[in-house]
Image (cartoon, rainbow, N blue to C red):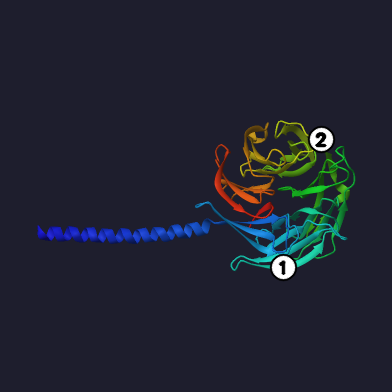
Amino acid sequence: MTKRVVSFLFFVLYLGISCQKEKKRDEKSSSKDITIVSENYLIGTYTDSLSQGINLLSFNPVTQELKTQVVLDSIPNPSFVATNKSKTIIAAVGEIQGEEGGLLQTFSYDKEKRIFKELTTVSTLGNDPCTLAFSPNENALIVGNYSGGNLTVFPIAPTGEIKNYPQVIQHEGNSITKQRQEKAHVHCVVFHPTENKLFVADLGNDTIDIIPFIEKDNEFVLLPEKTVSIKMPLGSGPRHMVFNEKGDKVYVVFELTNEVGVFDFKSNSLQLKEVVSLTGKKTKLGSAAELRISKNSQFLYVSVRGEDNQLVVFKTNYGNKLEKIQSIATDLKPRNFILTNEENFVLVANQESNSIILYKRDKKTGLLTQTSERVVINKPVYFYKL
């Protein structure tokens, strides 16, 4: 009996020690997992001082914790940022006005050391640059200048330095809403997912231009003489656009009328299928801002500023008619937002509230729920995954 008791006690002691070891291993593993899944986003802002600029937002989807820090200061109004595919080169516009337009800057980024280094600064040859994109093979940066009403194409070296002999394409024209459409206002540049075409939204003259390009032998050239210009509804003010995963549907947010247009893309043209109101109210000076589509193209999200301050959620019904399923309140002036890596959350940048708010997202239904997580940041206006 005594031997059995001693053996039993030894077994219990051994089991306890094993459990403690297993628990410590689990805790270490959990800690590593939390570190691994943390996501980083560059935040473009409007600035009020030299201490402000491009921010880095760290988001942990396990703990839902948000942290921000300024990583590149002394940059005036870096309202739009982008990176190359390997995340080693960062490009940003300086949305200002000057004798030679606004600014375009590039930076190198060491991912292991988390060190940012300025490479090049050039003028954009158009005032108030507000959008940019790397060309598909990353031989050029394309910049849209809002007040300048033009595009500038800058060759870029593989190491990130800008070669300052740009191609310039000037837009002309206007439209019916004189307060906002007195002249051309380039607002968005987006490359087609598979075809060698650049899509350019001009809020001022109510057009989307489709410009073919050639990119080979480390060179990129737009072919403006082959542009196909598609007229949008008069007074709509096309601001941003996004393709579905196949590239045969284009969703366009109309800023001035607070609407979304749905287009088929085929035979090098856009065919309007429907226009859907975001707020149910008619307006000619609206404030619709950003739109994003889920990876599976089943859900479309649009932000509206002004008096509305909300995100509007649609089911795309696989390219058939849009179905509005939710409108959810935000802070003031939700200029930009982004779906996180696994699309379980949405981060919303509220320019006038100086805040970024976290929303949970149901991947099956597409619906959003606001969380209590938020972070203070000066005038956030753009997200880009780092």
Hey, which quadrant is residue 202 in on the image? top right
Amino acid at circle 2: Pro
Percent position of residue 385, x then y: 64, 55
Question: Is residue 198 something one can see in this rendering?
Answer: no
Percent position of residue 221, x then y: 82, 56
Q: Is residue 333 above or below residue 143?
A: above
Mark 2 residue element: loop
Query: In this view of the protein, which residue sits in the foreground, 98 or 135?
Result: 98
Residue 344 - label: none
Within 10 Å of disc 2 (Cα), the crowding (few <14, some 14-19, many 20+) is some
Q: Mark 2 or mark 1: name the one nearer the start of the chain.
A: 1
CA distance separating discs 2 and 1: 42 Å
Q: Quadrant of the N terminus?
A: bottom left
Residue drawn 69% across and 48% down?
A: 352
Percent position of residue 66, x then y: 56, 54
- Horizontal placement of 114 versus 251: left or right? left
* View extreme (left): residue: 1
Within 10 Å of disc 1 (Cα), the crowding (few <14, some 14-19, many 20+) is some
Percent position of residue 130, x then y: 77, 52
Q: Quadrant of the C terminus?
A: bottom right
Amino acid at circle 1: Glu
Residue under label 1: 118
- Horizontal placement of 5 versus 329: left or right? left
Residue under label 2: 233
Residue drawn 65% across and 35% down?
A: 316
Residue drawn 63% across and 42% down?
A: 330
Hey, which quadrant is residue 235 in on the image? top right
Residue drawn 84% across and 51% down?
A: 147
Question: Is residue 71 something one can see in this rendering?
Answer: yes
Query: In this view of the protein, which residue sits in the foreground, 224 or 88?
Result: 88
Q: Is residue 131 above or below residue 246?
A: below
Hey, which quadrant is residue 132 in on the image? bottom right
